[in-house]
Amino acid sequence: MHQPPPTGIKKYIISDLIAAYLGWLVFFVIRKSEVEHLPIDIHTYLKDDNFLYGGIAVSLYWLYIYALTNTYQSIYTKSRIAEILKTIVQSLLGCLFLSILVVLDDLVDNYKDYYYLMNVMILTHLIPTLFFRIAWLFSAKSDIKTGRIKFPTLIIGNHPDIAEIYNDAKTLQPLQGISVESIWTNLKNIHVEIPTEEYIITELETKLRSSHYTHVILALSKEEKDQLSTYISLIDDTGIKIKVIPELHESLTSHTKISNPLGAPLIDINTDVMTPWQISVKKILDITISVLAVTILLPLLVVIAILIKRNSPGPILYKQERIGQYGKPFTIYKFRSMYVNAEAGGPQLSKTGDDRTTTIGQFIRKYRIDELPQFFNVLKGDMSLVGPRPERKFFADQIIQKTPEYKFIYKMLPGITSWGMVRFGYASSVDEMITRMRYDLMYVNNFSLLMDFRILIYTVMTIIKGKGL
């Protein structure tokens, strides 16, 4: 099974936190010694909560700013010049706001001290941050150039010049890490030094899911151009990055960009339903709200767990495999609302008045309390607060057979709540699941953060009214 390409994001985040913390410590010392005219005394600083704990708060503040401005993307695709300029702008604007919170209440001898402190804050933050980032970016470029980092790539299609396309793509390895390892084509007598293999388009998705490729280059013939959207849809469902040759650009309606203006050009296909900043904000909101919810609702979670345990024998939590983003399975957590072995006869959908439901189960389903453990799914990164309803593979396969467009919802993380759950509720048959799914498709096609807030509000209203069932 293919793995996501390496990104280097974790070390970028760690170095940003270290830089922010070090910058704060230096700023704190300069602030005390140069403006407040106090002697430099490390023992005194260590007794001041603003020295150590303030540094932690400031570091988290910067992490929030960087996530909000979509900084944490793969370091192997970043432009060094663009990243330096972006870091400078982030530091200037971030320090401007931070100085309002930190500096303006200081007692100073002259108003010029405020400007001095602001400049010190910018420099003490910007210099270590730039140092670490530039180091990582040059390291990333070196890893790509020397071949330590490669992105296993596959060329697919029957373009008559596919051998030349392969030779052009080879020039991208020292620039972008693109390493073409195989060609899937139905053409004969292709003179290349890598393996070639025939393929059938209907089997493409299955074969790609079991492969190790991180990128695919589409090199389709004129006869195949009408199927371009089909190819993109099939490949996109696997989470593999897609590039196309320039002559296919005019056939595309999605967002595209030139990946390398200096060498053999390929065009990146962007099939995301959210912009990078929307992804960042949505992720931040997911984590923030989930942490707050778990903290505030912890007493309720404990009470519900006790009631479930006393009401009927069996585990407190019910674990079930669902299909998530890019069609990958994950384990969903719910409070158990049914008797043990409720599905001994095979997968079944619940319905109103279901005799498999326990007494406490009827109550927690009515107010959707059984869904609360899914906040831990959100913290794990398997789910979002709002997104399409995740289904079991048994039912998802049946839905896909009747409505293939259902697979489009796999482009987003599934949600604890969804537009379909708000407008339709629980489904008791596959046909009802399809009806509910259409609302989720509308959500994916028309995503906005405002819509997320609306769905959350409607969900709270549904819970308060006890209309969960």
Image (cartoon, rainbow, N blue to C red):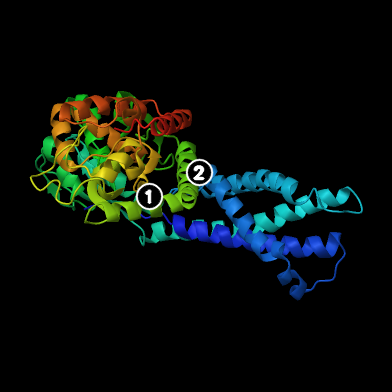
In this rendering, position of residue 304 left or right of residue 55: left
Q: Is residue 252 visible?
A: no
Q: Residue at x 37, y 35 (%)?
A: 272
Q: Which mark is residue 70?
A: 2
Marks 1 and 2 in Cβ contact (< 8 Å): no
- Element type at mark 2: loop
Q: How many marks?
A: 2
Q: Amino acid at mark 1?
A: Gly
Q: Quadrant of the C terminus?
A: top left
Residue 326: numbered disc: none
Q: CA separation, marks 1 and 2?
A: 17 Å
Residue 427: horizontal and vertical position, in percent? 22, 31
The residue lying at 14 percent from left, 44 percent from top is 190
In the image, which is nearer the foreground, mark 1 or mark 2?
Answer: 1
Q: Amino acid at mark 2?
A: Asn
Question: For this view, does 59 lie left or right of residue 176?
Answer: right
Q: Residue 44 location in percent, x, y? A: 77, 72
**SS assignment at label 1:** loop
Q: Eyeballing the image, is 469 above or below 287?
A: above
Marker disc for residue 381: 1
Where does residue 47 sit, x and y in percent of width and height?
Answer: 73, 70
